[in-house]
Amino acid sequence: MDVRALAESDISQWAELRAALWTDQPRDELEADGRVALAKDPPLVVFVAEDESVLAGFIEFGFRSVAEGCESSPVPYVEGWFVRESYRRRGIGAALMRAVEDWCRARGFVELGSDANASNRLSRDVHAALGFEEVETLVVFRRVL
């Protein structure tokens, strides 16, 4: 398994993985949004795990001026993290997170933020297993007007 930075030739498979993570958004929108985010300044940074030309997973992060529980600014912030079900429980998610941590440390960052829906027990457990601490639980409200 090779963990490396996203290449232009990976974008189609990356969009497929993004669509598997964010099932409520159309794949073509996720691909277009991803391309825009890659071109921003600062850009979205993406690492992929590749197994014989198949992308097994990805992790993407950007930068936030403020992140709950963090003291520094800007804060690298994981925006998406996904491993195909058939590749799970092999350490791929942890390897992707290590790539982010190494990238951040090499550039002098001292914190890394991330989040998960309160109901996503798997993501919360994986974050905890990799050393993240929960700092806040957020309930979001909506009212139709």
Image (cartoon, rainbow, N blue to C red):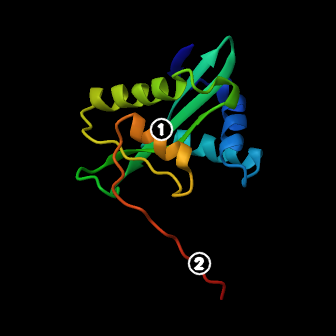
The residue positioned farthest toward the top in the image shown: 52
* Location of residue 116 with respect to 19 vertically, above or below: below
The answer to which image quadrant residue 83 occupies is: top right
| x, y percent for residue 27 | 75, 44
Judge from the rendering whether residue 21 lies leftward or rightward of residue 49; answer left or right: right
Q: Quadrant of the N terminus?
A: top right
For mark 1, does the 10 Å Cα neighbourhood hold few (<14), some (14 to 19), or many (20 or more) residues? few
Can residue 15 be seen? yes
Judge from the rendering whether residue 25 lies leftward or rightward of residue 5; answer left or right: right
The residue beneath circle 2 is 142
Report the number of discs. 2
| x, y percent for residue 34 | 61, 42
The residue beneath circle 1 is 126
Camera-side residue of 105 and 20? 20
Residue drawn at (51%, 22%) of the image: 91
* Location of residue 127 with respect to 23 vertically, above or below: above
Residue drawn at (33%, 32%) of the image: 104
Residue 52: which disc? none
Amino acid type at image mark 1:
Val
Q: Between marks 2 and 1, how big is the CA–CA gap?
A: 29 Å
Mark 2–mark 1 contact, CB under 8 Å? no
Q: Quadrant of the C terminus?
A: bottom right
Amino acid type at image mark 2:
Arg
Judge from the rendering whether residue 32 lies leftward or rightward of residue 62; answer left or right: right
Camera-side residue of 7 and 2? 2
| x, y percent for residue 62 | 44, 44
Q: Going from the N terminus, do you reach mark 2 or mark 1 first?
A: 1
Judge from the rendering whether residue 144 lies leftward or rightward of residue 135; answer left or right: right
| x, y percent for residue 24 | 72, 55
